[in-house]
């Protein structure tokens, strides 16, 4: 007897893989083999198993004890199941020849790492049934069961796990072993139904009819799966514990029969996975294109409205434009800011998913890049800023115009009232019939008129100056203003000429007249300027005023107080003028002279002086009230300025601080990516909770605009600056969160550890000198050199660096982001699906053909993904209905045909 203990474990698997297990299985239990039921089951099963392989060589065995005794069919069996050639057998009939042949077979088995305990060639040659069955079981273990591997388990455990997984969905099936779990036959039927459901009507099987169940499974397996009948239904049912080795041998035949289907299933799953990724990416691309188109269309519609500078005629119309602009700021623009931010987030997420799935970078349609949208957005904000400035300037201009137009009308009305009847007066010929005293009176009256005329020269010049300013400011009613001004100037010229003519006439007559009333003349001379002063005072007291600061209204109040301080002197002057008139009357009374009642030298009577003086006295308190009201208004405006400045001086620095803190978080490496993400989301929540402060500031700004307050010396912040900062803060926190989420997605998809992630970030930050979040080409090259890449300044190094730059910067922006950097580093160390793998998977489904048919795709893939492939695969030259899966696979990855 030859002892094979010395053979030891050898072969490709080594002792760590099959040695221990085989040592346990080779410990053949001699007592169990004496059980007749088990021996019968093993004889039938092992004989059928051997014949399933020997028939490939055109032979079979009838008696397992006798037919292997000469070693010839045993060597042939080993050659068939291993695919290897054994040494040439000896053809002699002598016992020594048979022993040599069996030894050659046993040596071959031992060379495969199998320990043969107490099995010798002489026992096989002698027809020892126990040893022969033990040898055949060892062969079955090595060549049919050992190589089975399911989820890190192999051999018997792997086969049992495979059976459990395949039969798990079926009722009344609970595979826990290879003996009693198979007695009712349902487990065999479940295995067949799981892989070939059309062959078994599983729902019609009954647990209480095991013989029918077993025979059904054995017959179907033999007829349709080419698995010979290795077991007897009655033997299994009538045995308390069926033979485990017989059951394992038969079940392993099912595993090998369905292994091809398993490969097809794996290939189909790979294709489904790739197609699902591609469909999801296409959906994201379509969403980006639509959102970008809608946003660009809104910008294109809005910019012409903001660039429209058509002036309006009234303040009310311009204020309506300003209100429309405020509605745009409050209602229409904020949602678009959110859409723009979401668009950038979607674009970054899509690019990350494309990189992770080894797909080409997404290039949006022409004019729809993120940079294109940013350029359009900048144009929009420039137009917006210019439009607001124009609106405010237009309101100031119209306000100034209204003030000047009202001032022009007041002065023109006063002047026209003064000039009324002056031409007729100057054209009178009363001096032709007057006495000497009358003519002297006329001369003095004319002198008084000339004094009055000179006093009105300033008003005429003011009227002309105001009309000129209205023309320069493009006042909408300038034609009527110009016509009225021209009429006043022409009339003024006529009055000047007539005054000169009348003076000459009176001087010629004066030589003939000597009587003069000195008192009336003095009255006229003093009454005329005083009357003009009162008219000017009434005009000033009724003059409109416009101020924007408390200092300006305080200046007007001071000027008014100064005017009031002159009233006692003016009152004394009035009393003195009235005293002259009373003195003239007294003298006339003393001399018995009867006066006509009117001063011949002036039309300014005491009644006129007193009436205008009373009017001045009435206008002074009204002016006081108007100035005090305006002072209260300016104080209220100052309160609004200080209120807005107080809030703006808090919100502005807060936004700047948050921007700096977020920038530090994106650069520093404190904690894991999840910690950084939680930290950033806390910042995001604090920003959202800070929104009421922005709303309060907007309300305060609204009050300032409604009060037409145009400047604020208490703060350097404008609402526009704070709005821009707030929008930048929202965009920055959203973009930073998206970058960290993409880093987590990349880390998890590529299997990168936290330590590797921190190492990548440390290397990146070391060369990111300006902390801008991106490396220039030279910085990136220095980083690669520090990591051991050969990209020095030579031809080979430059070529390698150009290749790497094409991977990390496909758009040629001239900078490398941290996301692109970790994508590259993870791509260098991890594996992803490739076009070659997808082509290999399609080849499995196509049965190793260079093309695939629509029928095969519909059979192997889910309906939606099968139709997706059929719609996109190009026809393959050859049989009708053939489809080219190679070009389709390479197109998925943006590669040229392999």
Image (tube, rainbow, N blue to C red):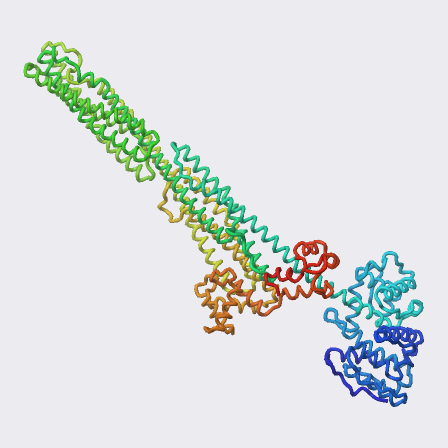
Q: Seen in the image, is 582 located left or right of residue 208?
A: left
- Give the quarter of the figure containing the C terminus: bottom right
Residue 201's place in the image compared with 4, above or below, is: above
Farthest residue in the front direction? 878
Name which quarter of the figure residue 352 lies in. Answer: bottom right
Q: Nearer the viewer, residue 54 or 514?
A: 54
Image quadrant in which you'd find residue 895: bottom right
User: Considering the image in quadrants, where does the N terminus appear?
Assistant: bottom right
Question: Which of 644/770 is in front?
Answer: 770
Q: Is residue 466 above or below residue 793?
A: above
- Count of marks, rendered view: 0
The x and y percentages for residue 37 are 93, 74
Q: Is residue 223 visible?
A: yes
Residue 745 visible somewhere in the drawing: no
Which x, y percent locates residue 494? 19, 22
User: Which percent across, then down, holds residue 631?
Assistant: 34, 36
């Amino acid at each position: 007897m030859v002892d094979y203990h010395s053979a030891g474990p050898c072969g490709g698997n080594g002792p760590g893989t099959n040695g221990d297990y085989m040592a346990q299985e080779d410990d053949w239990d001699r007592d169990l083999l004496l059980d007749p039921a088990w021996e019968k089951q093993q004889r039938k099963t092992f004989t059928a198993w051997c014949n399933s392989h020997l028939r490939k060589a055109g032979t079979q065995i009838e008696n397992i004890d006798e037919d292997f005794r000469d070693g010839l069919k045993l060597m042939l069996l080993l050659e068939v199941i291993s695919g290897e050639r054994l040494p040439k057998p000896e053809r002699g009939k002598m016992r020594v020849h048979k022993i040599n042949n069996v030894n050659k077979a046993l040596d071959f088995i031992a060379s495969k790492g199998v320990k043969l305990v107490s099995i010798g060639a002489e026992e096989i040659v002698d027809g020892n049934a126990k040893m022969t069955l033990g040898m055949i079981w060892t062969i079955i273990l090595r060549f049919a069961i050992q190589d089975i591997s399911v989820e890190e388990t192999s051999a018997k455990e792997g086969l049992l796990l495979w059976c459990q997984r395949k039969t798990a969905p079926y009722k009344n099936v609970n595979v826990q072993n290879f003996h009693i779990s198979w007695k009712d036959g349902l487990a065999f039927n479940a295995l067949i139904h799981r892989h070939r459901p059309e062959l078994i009507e599983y729902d019609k099987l009954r647990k209480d009819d095991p013989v029918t169940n077993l025979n059904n499974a054995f017959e179907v397996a033999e007829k349709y799966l080419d698995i010979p009948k290795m077991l007897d239904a009655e033997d299994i049912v009538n045995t308390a514990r069926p033979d485990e080795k017989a059951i394992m041998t038969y079940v392993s035949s099912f595993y090998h029969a369905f292994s091809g289907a398993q490969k097809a299933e794996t290939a189909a799953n790979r294709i489904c996975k790739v197609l699902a990724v591609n469909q999801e990416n296409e959906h994201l691309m379509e969403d980006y294109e639509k959102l970008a188109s809608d946003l660009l269309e809104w910008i294109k519609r809005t910019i012409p409205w903001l660039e429209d500078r058509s002036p309006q005629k009234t303040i009310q119309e311009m204020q309506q434009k300003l209100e429309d602009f405020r509605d745009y700021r409050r209602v229409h623009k904020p949602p678009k800011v959110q859409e723009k931010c979401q668009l950038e987030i979607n674009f970054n997420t899509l690019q990350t998913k494309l990189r992770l799935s080894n797909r080409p970078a997404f290039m949006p349609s022409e004019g729809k890049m993120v940079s294109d949208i940013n350029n359009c957005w900048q144009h929009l904000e420039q137009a917006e800023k210019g439009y607001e400035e124009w609106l405010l300037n237009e309101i100031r201009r119209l306000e100034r115009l209204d003030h000047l137009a009202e001032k022009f009308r007041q002065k023109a009305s006063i002047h026209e009232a003064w000039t009324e009847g002056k031409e007729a007066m100057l054209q009178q010929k009363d001096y032709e019939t007057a006495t000497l005293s009358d003519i002297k009176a006329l001369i003095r009256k004319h002198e008084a008129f000339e004094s009055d005329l000179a006093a009105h020269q300033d008003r005429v010049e003011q009227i002309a100056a105001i009309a000129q300013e209205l023309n320069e400011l493009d006042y909408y009613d300038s034609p009527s203003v110009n016509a009225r001004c021209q009429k006043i100037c022409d009339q003024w010229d006529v009055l000047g000429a007539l005054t000169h003519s009348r003076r000459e006439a009176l001087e010629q007559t004066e030589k003939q007249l000597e009587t003069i009333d000195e008192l009336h003349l003095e009255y006229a001379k003093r009454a005329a300027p005083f009357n003009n002063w009162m008219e000017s005072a009434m005009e000033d007291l009724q003059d409109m005023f416009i101020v924007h600061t408390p200092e300006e209204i305080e200046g007007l109040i001071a000027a008014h107080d100064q005017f009031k301080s002159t009233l006692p002197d003016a009152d004394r002057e009035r009393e003195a003028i009235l005293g002259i008139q009373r003195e003239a009357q007294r003298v006339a009374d003393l001399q018995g002279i009867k006066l006509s009642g009117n001063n011949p030298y002036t039309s300014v009577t005491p009644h006129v002086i007193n009436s205008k003086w009373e009017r001045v006295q009435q206008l002074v308190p009204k002016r006081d009230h108007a100035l005090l009201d305006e002072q209260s208004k300016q104080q209220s405006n100052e309160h609004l300025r200080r209120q807005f400045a107080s809030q703006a001086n808090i919100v502005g620095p807060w936004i700047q601080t948050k921007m700096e803190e977020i920038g530090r978080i994106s650069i520093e490496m404190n904690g894991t990516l999840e910690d950084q993400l939680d930290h950033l989301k806390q910042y995001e929540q604090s920003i959202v909770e800070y929104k009421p402060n922005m709303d309060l500031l907007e309300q305060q700004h609204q009050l300032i605009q409604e009060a037409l307050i145009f400047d604020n010396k208490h703060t350097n912040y404008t609402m526009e600056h704070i709005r821009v900062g707030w929008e930048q803060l929202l965009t920055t926190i959203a973009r930073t969160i998206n970058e960290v989420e993409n880093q987590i997605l990349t880390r998890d998809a590529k299997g990168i550890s936290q330590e590797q992630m921190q190492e990548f970030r440390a290397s990146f930050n070391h060369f990111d000198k300006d902390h801008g979040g991106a490396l220039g080409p030279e910085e990136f090259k220095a980083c690669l050199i520090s990591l051991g890449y050969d990209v020095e300044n030579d031809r080979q190094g430059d070529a390698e660096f150009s290749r790497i730059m094409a991977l990390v910067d496909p758009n040629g922006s001239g900078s490398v982001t941290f996301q692109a950097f970790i994508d590259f580093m993870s791509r260098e160390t991890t594996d992803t699906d490739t076009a070659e793998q997808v082509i290999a998977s399609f080849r499995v489904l196509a049965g190793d053909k260079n093309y695939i048919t629509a029928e095969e795709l519909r059979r192997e893939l889910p309906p939606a993904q099968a139709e997706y492939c059929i719609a996109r695969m190009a026809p393959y030259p050859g049989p009708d209905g053939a489809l080219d899966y190679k070009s389709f696979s390479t197109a998925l990855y943006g590669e040229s045909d392999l």
